[in-house]
Amino acid sequence: MRSFGDPCAPGFDWRPTRLWALALAFSCLACATGAPAPPREGTGTAWGYLKLVPREGVTPHQAGGSPYADRRMRDVTFVDYSKPGFAVVYLDAGPSVGGSAELLIRTTGVRTRLDPPQAAVGAGGVVVVRNASAAPHVLSAPALGVVRRLEPGEQVELALPDAGEQSLFLLDVPRSESTLFVAPGPFAVVSAEGRFELSGIVPGRYAVLAWHPRFPPARASLDLGPNRVVRLDLEMGVDQHGGGENAPANQP
């Protein structure tokens, strides 16, 4: 009887093993590159990494002391350029995904703050602010023309019809602020490693932009065909003027 389990057995068929090994190799390659799955029929996917680039004179990997060449800046808080933190990559056109975001007014120890400090939602979406503290607080959203006192446990829902950056404050708590980014089209919040993925995109030409609360925006062009996956890496920094690589990654 032919055996398919023992490679030393007479008549062993190597073909299933080779096919399995080939499939495993492709799977490992996809994991290593972070490439997304094939897009839905008739749509496309754009993905890549957002990289923070330090300005001239900054040495991010300097051991000990200040990462800045200027000694006068030795006490400046260092930005970890290996991790972008909160950032949003979005398209300048296309249907907005709307959606919602939630902010909490919470007290930890002696400090009261809006949490999280940054959030993102699509144009036409809403933000819900809930007072999870034990005291009343006054919420202000200047761009929305809102000033509202929230009792403990009370919440308010604010509509966000327009794209752009919105700031929310607690008027009775100094330095308590949350920044909300409202994207005009499809968007993705980058991962801790800087990876983003925009899927289900209608084929066409777009501008891809990246927003970060501390750096100027980055911008690149995207020409996306149907049933295609395109990799687009972006660089962002004080000395940067936008830009990225528009190179196809996987094509069905």
Image (spheres, grey):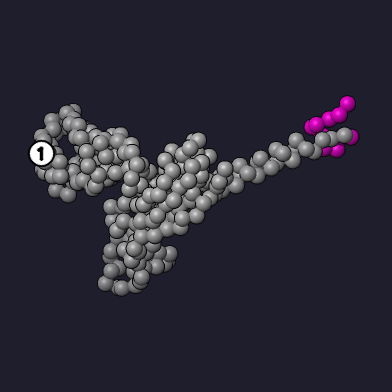
Q: Nearer the viewer, residue 213 or 211?
A: 211
Viewed as shown, does residue 87 lie left or right of 22?
left
Residue ID at (65%, 44%): 25
Residue for point 30% across, 73% down: 71
Q: Amino acid at mark 1?
A: Val
Q: Where does residue 209 sit, x and y in percent of width and height?
A: 35, 52
**Can see residue 172?**
yes
Q: Quadrant of the N terminus?
A: top right
> In the rendering, at what x and y percent does residue 132 appear?
21, 32
- In the rendered image, the quadrant that contains the C terminus is top right
Kindly indicate the quadrant of the structure image that contains residue 61. bottom left
Location of mark 1 (residue): 147
Magenta span contains residue 9:
yes
For the question of whether residue 133 can be seen, the reply is: no
Q: Nearer the viewer, residue 233 or 204?
A: 204
Image position of 110 with respect to 134: above or below: below
SS at badge 1: strand
Q: Residue furthest top?
A: 1
Q: Pointer 1: residues within 10 angstroms few (<14), some, or many (20+)?
A: some
Residue drawn at 51 percent across, 44 percent down: 228
Residue 126 counted in the magenta span: no
Identify which residue, 244 or 60, lies in the foreground: 244
Name the spot of residue 239 as percent of width and height, x first. 33, 66
Q: Quadrant of residue 136?
A: top left
The total number of labels drawn is 1
- The residue sitting at 20% across, 35% down in the picture is 159
Of residues 77 and 91, the one nearer the viewer is 91
Q: Main secondary structure of the magenta part?
A: loop
The stretch in magenta equals: 1-10
In this rendering, position of residue 33 left or right of residue 224: right
Q: Residue 28: horizontal and vertical position, in percent?
A: 61, 44
